Image (cartoon, rainbow, N blue to C red):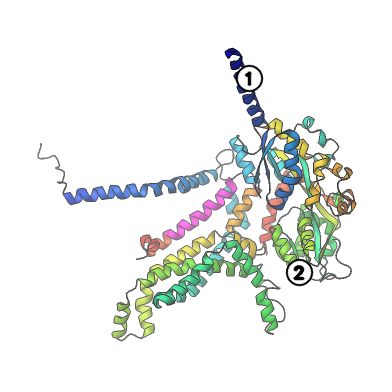
Amino acid sequence: MQACAPTPPPATPSRRHARREDRLMLALAAPAALVVLLLLVLPMAWLFAQSFYDGGFTLQHYRRIFTERIYFDTFALTFRISVATTLLALLLGYPVAYAAARLPQRWRLVVLGLVLVPFWTSVLVRAYAWLILLQRTGVVNKGLQAAGLIDSPLPLVHNELGTMIGTLHILLPFMILPLYATMQKIPHDLLMAGSSLGGSPAHVFRRVFLPLSLPGIVAGCTMVFVLCLGFYITPELLGGGKTIMVSMVVSRNVELYNQWGAASAVSVVLLACVFAIFALIGRFLPLERVVAPR
Amino acid sequence: MAARQYQRIAAAVLGAAASTAALAAGQITFVSQGGAWQEAQTQGILEPAAKQLGITIRQDSAPDAWPMIKTQGETGKPVWDVVDTPTVNCLRGGKAGLIETLDYGKLPNAKPMPAAYKSPYSVAYEFYSSVLAYSKDTYKTNPPSTWADFWDVKKYPGHRSLRNHPLATLEAALMADGVAPDKLYPLDVDRAFRKLEEIKPYITVWWTSGGQSAQLLHDGEVDMIMAWNGRVSDLIKSGANVAYTYNQGVLQSTHLCILKNSPNLETAHAFVNAAISPELQANIPLSIDYGPGNPEAFKTGKIPAARTQELPSAPENAARQALMAYEWWTSPEGEAAEKRWLAFMQSK
């Protein structure tokens, strides 16, 4: 009988050590986990519960979202602007990150500094700055008119275009920084090896550098896209009131309906969309690598 | 001797206790919208009222008080007592049980005020107006003076802006369509939106904040705008070549209301009564471009005649405007109209 009882594997010192280390790591993570639980998970659970509540259980908030056309239009517009902004940010951000990663230390600091300075300026201030630049009587239109390039001012702001310019400017660092972090870690030797094996610069870039920078691309795109989905001040100020994004509908629903449920439901649907996108990305790339590119 | 000393100490302790109790009762938290308006009130109304009543007034500010009113009302233990907020919030909150019903017996100063300036839950505190403003550079002679002119894109070419909100905008649309300012309510919502569809392609910007509306007119981004009178008069004072008319303006107000279950209900009533007294009300226009909520203020002699002319609630100006019916806007029809706005804005 005694022979049948599974004998616990002898706890070797190294295994015991590992277990102790695990516990220590858990203890270290506990405060942060607690903060996340209290300030993020619980409020979100409350938000979720509210979206089904109107004096009792109800699905009316969701019914409204799926039956009234404005909600569909708003989500469609928000996703369109987010996709376009993400692609433009990648197009503009990739060369900057590439340059920063390949430049000598001194110039690298200059480039990263230029990326970060606007990052430290308030979103509101930057929206107003764009207004001054882009409006009918703004610097850009006046300049183009003075140069004789256009006869009448171009509608650069108070529309979708203005919203995208302002949003793109604010989100660019979120694309450049993860890209830079990934590119910086690509060993130069690999590129040299590619060249020495006869690859043209374009070929080496396409076959070696680009695939290795992929985690940065995914990380940057994910961040820009998700942040863009929730943008509020910029479309409010630069969209001329005609560019209605999801966050604006959330805020307006708090005013319009006498409960939080109407606004909560919109947020829950947006959140579900974000989770769906993450799940999709997770199928192509392990999320670990997206969050912490190596 | 010792006994007498004890008595004295006891009396002193009791007295101190009594005075702290009085102090606790004589304390309210007053909330307004911050900025220049809250500063003007601090001097003109809050400090004199605190002195008059011997109470302490703590201040808080919230540019948008509604979410807070809702949250505090639902907890049943409000931190705020008296709130100065757009009238729509008072009525909506009152109907939802978040705002106390006022005891007008304790508000003798409200007695001479017109019935339209009072509601079961709130009383008029100050008036502002949504007016037609324009650039004098663009319209030198014969400037636009009615909403029909605003809608007339042939006679008055130029860029236009309206507020991104149905309140006052639907009223303007109906006046543009020929409805008299005193015959607006109940609003013909379908007719108003039809009229708005007409002007929609010509609206460059639907503004959301007062600051934005001023900037649009100041920078020449638009030539004509519906904006709040105080914002336009600030521009005029700063030297901008713009003007406005009270003709067909929409007279709007903020009201004072008391949060449901306010722990200082008595003091709150006493404060509201003092705040709407003609004497203190007359202080408002001396430092800011808002009109007193109590018209009796114009009879105190404190407001110079030249100043009276500039104020939205001066009897002469009020007569040329439409008085917003908040009762209608908080009715089911009004709320439906508000919900329809978003769909209107989004349709191409």
Res. B333 in view: no
Q: Secondary structure at mark 1?
A: helix
The first of marks 1 and 2 along the sequence is 1
Quarter assignment of residue A79:
bottom right
In the rendered structure, which amino acid carries the disc numbered 1?
Answer: Ala
List x then y, in percent, for residue B106. 77, 31
List x then y, in percent, for residue A43. 50, 46
Compared across the picture, whether B99 is left or right of B322 comes to left
Crowd class of label 1 (few under 14; some 14 to 19; many from 20; radius 10 Å): few
Res. A289 in view: yes
Residues drawn in magenta: A256-278
Depth check: B287 or B268 in front? B287
Compared across the picture, whether A230 is left or right of B194 comes to left
**Overall secondary structure of the magenta stretch?**
helix
Depth check: B262 or A90 in front? B262
Which residue position is annotated with label 1? Answer: B11
In the rendered structure, which amino acid carries the disc numbered 2?
Answer: His
Compared across the picture, whether B22 is left or right of A62 comes to right
Q: Chain of mark 1?
A: B
**A289 lies above or below B339:** below
Crowd class of label 2 (few under 14; some 14 to 19; many from 20; radius 10 Å): some
Quarter assignment of residue B166:
bottom right
Residue in view at x 59 percent, y 41 percent: A54
Which residue position is annotated with label 2? Answer: B159
Q: Chain of mark 2?
A: B
List x then y, in percent, for residue A202. 39, 83
Could you tell me how far apart the alpha carbons at marks 1 and 2 are, in whole angstroms? 74 Å
